[in-house]
Image: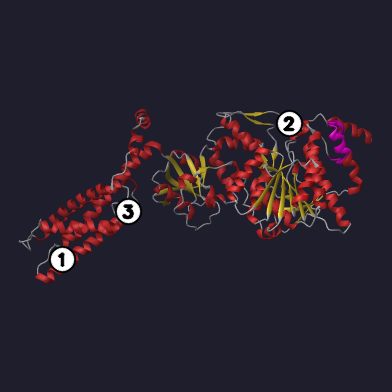
Amino acid sequence: MDNFKNKIKSSNIFAYLSSIGYLPRWMVLLVDVVLCIVAYFCAFQLAYHYYYFQYASVQLYEIKNIIITLGCQILWFWVFHTYSGILRYSTFIDATKLLYAIIANASTLITIHYLVLLAIGKGVFLRLGIVLYAIFAFLLLFSLRLVVKTLYDTLVIRAGRAISVVVYGTKSAGISIAKMIRSDVNSHYRVDGFIDDRSNQNKQIFGLPIFSTKSKDIISNLQKKRIKAIVVSPLKLNDVNITKSLNCFIDAGFQILMIPSLRHYKEGDDISGFDIEKNLKKIQIEDLLGRKPIEIDKSPIEKMIAGKVILITGAAGSIGSEIVRQLSMFKPKKLILLDNAETPLHNIRLELTEKFHNIEYAFVIADVRMRDRIESVFSEMRPNVVFHAAAYKHVPLMEDNPAECVLANVLGSRNVADMAVKYGTESFVMVSTDKAVNPTNVMGCSKRIAEIYVQSLSKKLANQSGKAPRFITTRFGNVLGSNGSVIPLFRQQIEKGGPVTVTHPDIIRYFMTIPEACQLVLEAGTIGNGGEIFIFDMGMPVKIADLAKKMIRLSGLEPGVDIQIEYTGLRPGEKLYEELLNNEELVKPTSHDKIMIANVREYEYDEMLPMYDKLFEYAQENQNYLVVRTMKEMVPEYKSQNSVYQQIDSELKNNYL
């Protein structure tokens, strides 16, 4: 029997049935009229038998009565457009239209009957016949639509192409989604129930069961119903515990679907008319951070940005380009996008000129390492605010190229900061990283040295009581989906069939989405007085191995079965966990609960300047060993891990003994 069903399902019969065109309106009207004729004869036949012994002269089938009945009925069909709906997709609205048309017709016939009775003393219809006709006509017309819809649903959708889903959420947003899926004429999904966090045993919506997450049998119950996917309502996506709620379903192999563009909707909002099929997508790992969306106060940001000339370095990168997008919404006078990567800068240019027509942009190809070139940009364009996001960021590459890392991350930061001072910039916001805390690699230490330069410069200028930019540094962890990050890598590996490579089974990282990281950067830029290093609340750390497994399951595959996970070992300079603060550092709160100020060790600018000059000299000569040694002297907490430069730590330790 199962083999027979499978053969039927695998045949083209369902594709053929679903491809059959819709009946034209005149044909639907014709079928309805035929059913009305049947209803007429059945109704008046019964009425005739009832009246027979009282009025022997009753004429049952007078042609004028049939013409009046059907003529009036067609008129009301036209008024309520009962024939406009597609039979296979009939809804409650279609049934309501039928009811209105039939009641209106019955009222019309009764009115005609009494008008004629008053005029000539003899009625036209049997009153009981009119009532019975209305009942029979509605039942026949409604049954036709119900039978067609049920047959189509059973033969084509249920046995053919539709995916069985349940909606997670039983309030207005979830119910609206279910309605839209059920009424979508081209839907590839079939709603077979709801999921709720409350105990709703034996309760139903639309005649469909509600599965409670409080039940320990929820997974087996869903599997028995052959549910393939779970559609999460917008309200649930904003729930702080959504990750925990979805984990059991992901682990059980259910697809998780979401509506990204509805995440801003609130409970009770009307989402009718929304194209559900177009917007229903598989949930992404970025949506499973398990944190509430970050809220920022836009007024101070607009005050800082509106009408100003803003320079963004590294503007074509993941962080820089998102900063540009967000700044574009605050009506700046001009945005200067500076980057040395031609093609990415060209791509962001195309995007911005399409989306934001009322903003003036300048797209500058330049390298922050070239001091004269950076000065020419400042001299010509005089930016009021600088967001410095240009940097090398990949740990293994920078471990192999310390000199280039220092020139880009440290010398580049120095050049931009010095020009900001020279040309009267109001604010300078530098993007740093959690890898600058207790650094174990060249990249992290280079960012710490850049932090030291900016902070010590700010301190010196503050002591001189002169006009100076507000120098602000922001630290955060890994950004989900950024260029070259682990998320795109895992996606590519999964698409290729694996294996997915993880460096160590215990490695953990803090994660943040690109938009929320940039929002906090902008917010920090408004609350800083100068010289602060701001750190962001990164939430709970994520185990990379668990991240890989979850991404495999979200792709509808099974880790270790469909896709293998291989552990490749820690890379040079990589550590098992990142820190947002040095052990000796404390934090102070700010006006934003997601942003804190790090109390870091402060350096004197004049004392450190000779060290910077020496560092740059070694870097320009490409003396990598001396570059790293100098970096360790400048940042004593820098201890290399899994790196050829670990020997320098031993040498320096012996020198101190």
Q: Which residue is the site of mark 2?
A: 571
Whether residue 631 is in magenta: the answer is yes
Please state the horizontal and vertical placement of residue 625, each as a whole percent of the image. Answer: 85, 31
Q: Residues within 10 Å of mark 1 (few under 14, many from 20)?
A: some
Q: Which residues are magenta?
A: 614-637
- The kind of secondary structure element at disc 2 is loop
Return the mark for residue 627.
Answer: none
Position of 576 relative to 453 (above/below): above
- Residue at 85% in and 32% down: 621
Q: What is the distance, in whole Å, between disc 2 and disc 3 at their CAs?
A: 65 Å
Residue type, label 2:
Arg
Q: Residues within 10 Å of mark 2 (few under 14, many from 20)?
A: some
Residue type, label 3:
Asp
Of the numbered discs 2 and 1, the one sitting upstream in the chain is 1
Which quadrant of the view contains residue 486?
Answer: top right
Question: Looking at the image, can residue 211 be seen?
Answer: no
Q: What is the distance, in whole Å, between disc 3 and disc 1 at their CAs?
A: 29 Å
Q: Which residue is the site of mark 1?
A: 113
Return the mark for residue 94.
Answer: 3
